[in-house]
Image (cartoon, rainbow, N blue to C red):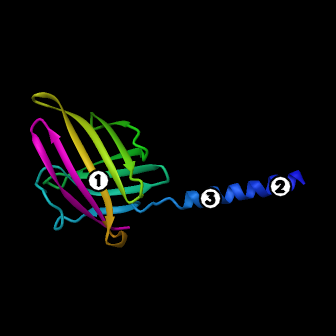
């Protein structure tokens, strides 16, 4: 009798685990390309042109591709927890600290990063805050952002169309 109760309890626990894991949102996963016409505050300097995102229950893997005005691409990959825990990587000899936090309603992600770069004046920190949300039935990724460093600040909204 104990074996049947234990087996039944194990089955119930297994199905609850599977259902809660499959209930997590992965709405940000996909391949996204910048929509320049809809986006604001773009210039010929370095800009985020596309992203590939793999969202899992508690993590976010991104492959970001930045481009300059000459069409040169600068990709980098980042793996973050969605709990707000800080992650550290190095991008083209520049240390970067970043964290991402899924909102309680699973509809947006708050993202923060500090990338240290080196110029003629020495080290400087590029501080970025982004808020990601999905629009248009899952076809559009909206990114409100603000960046600051010793040379000034910039804010705007980027729109990405889902490619895959």
Q: Which of marks 3 and 2 is nearer the N terminus?
A: 2
Which residue does the numbered mark 2 point to in the structure image? Answer: 5
Measured as percent of width and height from the top left, residue 13 is found at 69, 55
Which residue does the numbered mark 1 point to in the structure image? Answer: 131
Q: Earlier in the sequence, mark 2 or mark 1?
A: 2
Number of residues whose C-alpha sits closer than 10 Å to that of mark 2, classed few (under 14), some (14–19) or many (20 or more): few
Residue at 41% across, 58% down:
105
Spatial CA distance of label 3 from label 1 is 29 Å
Measured as percent of width and height from the top left, residue 161 is found at 29, 67
Q: What stretch is highlighted in magenta?
A: 141-164
**Relative to 75, is 28 above or below?**
below
- Mark drawn on residue 89: none
Which residue does the numbered mark 3 point to in the structure image? Answer: 18
Q: What element carries label 3?
A: helix
Viewer-proximal residue among 146 and 37: 146
- Select label 2 or label 1 by which is in front: 2
Q: Is mark 2 on a helix, strand or loop?
A: helix
Measured as percent of width and height from the top left, residue 24 is found at 50, 59
Task: Please report contact status of discs 3 and 2: CB closer than 8 Å, yes or no.
Answer: no
Q: Which of marks 3 and 1 is nearer the N terminus?
A: 3
Spatial CA distance of label 2 from label 1 is 47 Å
Task: Tell me which secondary structure the magenta stretch mostly adopts.
Answer: strand
């Amino acid at each position: 009798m104990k074996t049947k109760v234990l087996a039944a309890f194990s089955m119930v626990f297994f199905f609850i685990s599977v259902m809660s894991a499959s209930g997590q949102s992965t709405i940000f996963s996909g391949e996204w390309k910048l929509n320049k016409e809809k986006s604001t505050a773009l210039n010929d300097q370095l800009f985020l042109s596309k992203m590939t995102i793999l969202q899992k229950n508690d993590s976010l893997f991104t492959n970001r591709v930045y481009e300059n005005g000459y069409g040169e691409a600068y990709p980098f990959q980042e793996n973050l927890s969605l709990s707000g825990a800080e992650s550290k990587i190095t991008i083209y000899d520049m240390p970067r600290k970043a964290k991402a936090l899924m909102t309680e309603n699973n509809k947006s992600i708050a993202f923060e990063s500090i990338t240290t770069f080196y110029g003629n004046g020495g080290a400087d920190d590029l501080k970025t805050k982004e808020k990601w949300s999905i629009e248009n039935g899952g076809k559009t990724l909206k990114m409100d952002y603000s960046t600051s460093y010793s040379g000034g600040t910039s804010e705007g909204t980027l729109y990405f169309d889902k490619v895959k």
